Image (cartoon, rainbow, N blue to C red):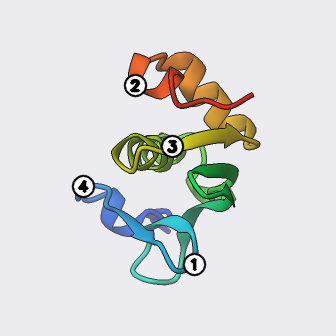
Amino acid sequence: MAHSGPLGALEQGFPIRVEHDRKRRQFTIRLNGCHDRAVLLYEYVGKKTVDLQHTEVPDAYRGRGIAKHLAKAAMDFVVEEDLKAHLTCWYIQKYVKENPLPRYLERLQP
């Protein structure tokens, strides 16, 4: 029996689209229609400071670079909105370390 796996649109070469829900303070990627999704959660911890708290990708989709798209979108949001970022999430810490762009580094809060 052939099994195509759970990737759906990603397997067919569709671009990964990150959605930003400002009200819920999260970035999401729909992975299989609207059933499966990857998410990055953040909270405002000051007027101009966000805490990038948690990134989660369903087990079946891990190791495919999906979290990288969420991390980039979150860091670009920090830059575009002229915010500071506290990185609670280990994955975003790793992403910034691997992508040490000055525009990201100058936004980090210890």
**Residue 30 appears at what percent x and percent y?**
43, 71
Q: CA distance from mark 4 to mark 3?
A: 16 Å
Quadrant occupied by the C terminus: top right
* Residue 20 occupies quadrant: bottom left
Q: CA distance from mark 1 to mark 2?
A: 25 Å
Mark nearer the N terminus (1 vs 2): 1
Q: Secondary structure at mark 4?
A: loop
Q: Which residue is mark 2?
A: 103
Please give the label number shown on residue 39: none
Q: Is any atom of residue 68 visible in this view?
A: yes
Mark nearer the N terminus (1 vs 4): 4
Q: CA distance from mark 4 to mark 2?
A: 25 Å
Viewer-side label of 1, 3: 1
**Residue 80 appears at what percent x and percent y?**
34, 46
Viewer-side label of 2, 3: 2
Mark nearer the N terminus (1 vs 3): 1
Q: Which residue is mark 3?
A: 71
Mark nearer the N terminus (2 vs 3): 3
Residue 14, compared with residue 92, is above or below; it is below
Q: Which residue is mark 1?
A: 24
User: The disc labelled 4 sits on which kind of residue?
Assistant: Pro
Residues under numbered marks 1 and 3 in contact, where contact means CB atoms less than 8 Å apart: no
User: The disc labelled 3 sits on which kind of residue?
Assistant: Ala
| 10 Å crowding of disc 1: few (<14), some (14-19), many (20+) | few
Mark nearer the N terminus (4 vs 2): 4
Q: CA distance from mark 1 to mark 4?
A: 24 Å
Viewer-side label of 4, 2: 2
Q: Which residue is mark 4?
A: 15
Residue 56, compared with residue 34, is above or below; it is above
